[in-house]
Image: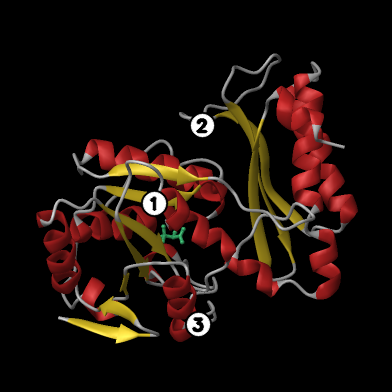
Amino acid sequence: MLGEIANLPVARTAQALRAQVRSWRMEGLRVALTPTMGALHDGHLTLLDVARGPGRADKVAASIFVNPTQFAAGEDFDTYPRDEARDAAMLAASGCDLLYAPSPDQMYPDGFATEVRVTGLTDLLCGAARPGHFDGVALVVSKLLIQAEADVAVFGEKDWQQLAVIRRLAWDLDIPTDILGAPVLREADGLAMSSRNRYLSQPQRAVAPVLHRRLRLAASEIIGGADPTAACAAAASGLLADGFESVDYLEARTADSLALIETAPPPTQSRLFAAARLGRARLIDNVPIEAEAASKAL
Ligand code: PAF
């Protein structure tokens, strides 16, 4: 049974979600799922735009679930911003057809005992900096994909590694949902949109766009023939000099298998990845290492 919030139909259980998706599919409509943790910003709305692209989906369901299993002790699970009414209004205004907002008890009832783990891809970058994080993501995304039975699901490319992990698990588990990426949406000064940007104080917000600038500069140096390891090390030192408190990683890797690139020239389809801390915020970003990105670097 569906409820309603801000004129948007809401499913609170997997059964209600699946019944609605199945009924759309019985009418011959294609359905997309756009999973989120709420605290929506315009970047999330691009997930819906990608979902509605030609031949993709006629109906879009967005999920909002702050997933406890992907937060480690001491991370921001308790303080993660939650405002369902505001999020629902944003989704309704952008033409979303259904909100799926299950409770933690619905997703993880007493006795829940299953784990989902994608090996390899999760040992590096954010996986190394946040042990267990991707196990929680893999678990909840597997559940969401199985619950929704959607034709396509869309995830943001800002979390490039997460997207790679999700593609892997959908393939490995024969989940018949096409996994699509949505390009990073940036503020005018280049900062990638993120729910956690609201943790930044005003002075920190002024420093934050440097993350993207340093990545682009390093990409342009690598395209120009610089040693990737040296360019990444210089960019990381630059971030610290600019005011970031620490850099979890800043590395060049291949786009699909995330293999480390240590020598020039980089293979085609390679990217720079970074995570760095500024006050309460841990910012992540990634850029392609390609001539076009390099030309806009400075
Ligand atoms: O990217 C996110 O918002 C979350 O990691 C996701 C994919 C919704 C799983 O909780």
N-term-proximal mark, 3 vs 1: 1
- Under circle 3, the secondary element is helix
Residue identified by numbered label 1: 52
| Image coords of residue 22 (percent x, y) | 12, 60
| Image coords of residue 101 (percent x, y) | 32, 76
Circle 1 Cα neighbour tier, 10 Å, few/some/many (<14 / 14–19 / ≥20): some
Circle 2 Cα neighbour tier, 10 Å, few/some/many (<14 / 14–19 / ≥20): many
Q: Nearer the viewer, mark 3 or mark 1?
A: 1
Q: CA distance from mark 3 to mark 1?
A: 22 Å
| Image coords of residue 27 (percent x, y) | 12, 56
Look at the picture and state if 290 lies above or below 163.
above
Look at the picture and state if 279 lies above or below 82.
above
- Relative to residue 224, is residue 151 drawn left or right? left
Disc marking residue 86 = 3
Residue identified by numbered label 2: 258
Q: Quadrant of residue 41?
A: bottom right
- Relative to residue 151, is residue 267 drawn left or right? right
N-term-proximal mark, 3 vs 2: 3
Task: Name the residue type under label 3.
Answer: Arg
Q: Where, quadrant-wise, is the C terminus in this rendering? A: top right
Q: Nearer the viewer, mark 3 or mark 2?
A: 3
Contact (Cβ within 8 Å) of mark 3 with mark 1: no
Task: Name the residue type under label 2.
Answer: Leu
- The residue at 16%/73% (across/down) is 16
Q: Quadrant of residue 198?
A: bottom right
Q: CA distance from mark 3 to mark 2?
A: 36 Å
Q: Is mark 3 within 8 Å of ligand 1?
A: no
- The residue at 44%/68% (across/down) is 37
Residue at the far left in the pictured view: 26
Task: Name the residue type under label 1.
Answer: Arg
